[in-house]
Image (cartoon, rainbow, N blue to C red):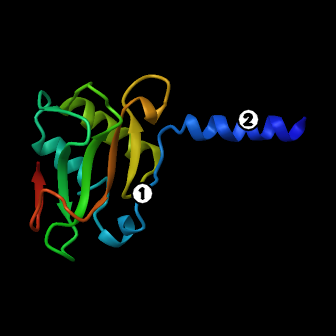
Amino acid sequence: MKLIIVLAALFGLSIQLGINCRGSVMCTGCKQPLGDDGMLDFINENLHDDAVFTDGQQIACKSCHIFKQEGLCVFAQKMGQKIVTGLEVKQAVQRLKEHGCKYCGSAPLYPGNNVNAGEITVNYVSNGCIKHGDRIC
């Protein structure tokens, strides 16, 4: 009986993964912080609040300067047919910083803290919209 309760709890946690600091092992090696002088400041200064993004679309990238197109990028995931605005992206990345994320992570876009219903993710990518430097995609 106890095993069933534990398994049910673990299964429920995996489905209801909320705001988190998970990402590639390359996140820390990239040395592009999420907070001060990092991604959050960059998008706050350069991303228009009324910009619109769809599922899987890269929103902004900061180069790691190791290879040509790799870096940390912000993108929308698990959105289905929904869209997300620049303002909502900024708010989600702010929540990641407040959560204590240093480089990478995912923040739910909708009430319920469930990233499976739509999320903004900051993660390392090898094919970002950049060729050194920082860029709104």
Q: Nearer the viewer, residue 1 or 114?
A: 1
Task: Using the image, determine if residue 95 lies above or below residue 111.
Answer: below
- What whole-number distance in Å separates the C-alpha atoms at marks 2 and 1? 25 Å
Image position, residue 8 (x, y; %) = 73, 35
Based on the displayed image, in which of its 4 quarters is residue 10 positioned? top right
For this orientation, the residue located farthest to the right is 1
Residue at x 38% of width, y 68% of height: 28
The residue indicated by pointer 1 is 23
**Relative to 9, 1 lies left or right:** right
Q: How many marks?
A: 2
Question: Is label 1 in a helix, a strand or a loop?
Answer: loop
**Relative to 39, 49 lies left or right:** left
Q: Amino acid at mark 2?
A: Ala
Q: Nearer the viewer, residue 37 or 29?
A: 29
**Relative to 16, 134 lies left or right:** left
Q: Nearer the viewer, residue 21 or 13?
A: 13
Q: Amino acid at mark 1?
A: Gly
Based on the displayed image, in which of its 4 quarters is residue 111 positioned? top left
Using the image, tell me which numbered label, if any, was put on residue 8. 2
Residue at x 20% of width, y 47% of height: 58
Q: Nearer the viewer, residue 80 or 85?
A: 80
Residue at x 46% of width, y 51% of height: 21
Please tell me which of labels 2 and 1 falls first in the chain.
2
Question: Is label 2 in a helix, a strand or a loop?
Answer: helix
> Disc 2 vs disc 1: which is toward the camera?
2
Image position, residue 44 (x, y; %) = 18, 42
Q: Quadrant of the N terminus?
A: top right
Task: Using the image, determine if residue 34 lies above or below residue 106.
Answer: below
Image position, residue 71 (x, y; %) = 23, 64
Image position, residue 42 (x, y; %) = 17, 50
Please tell me how crowded label 2 is: few (under 14), some (14-19), or many (20+) other residues with Cα within 10 Å: few
Task: Using the image, determine if residue 133 lies above or below residue 47.
Answer: below
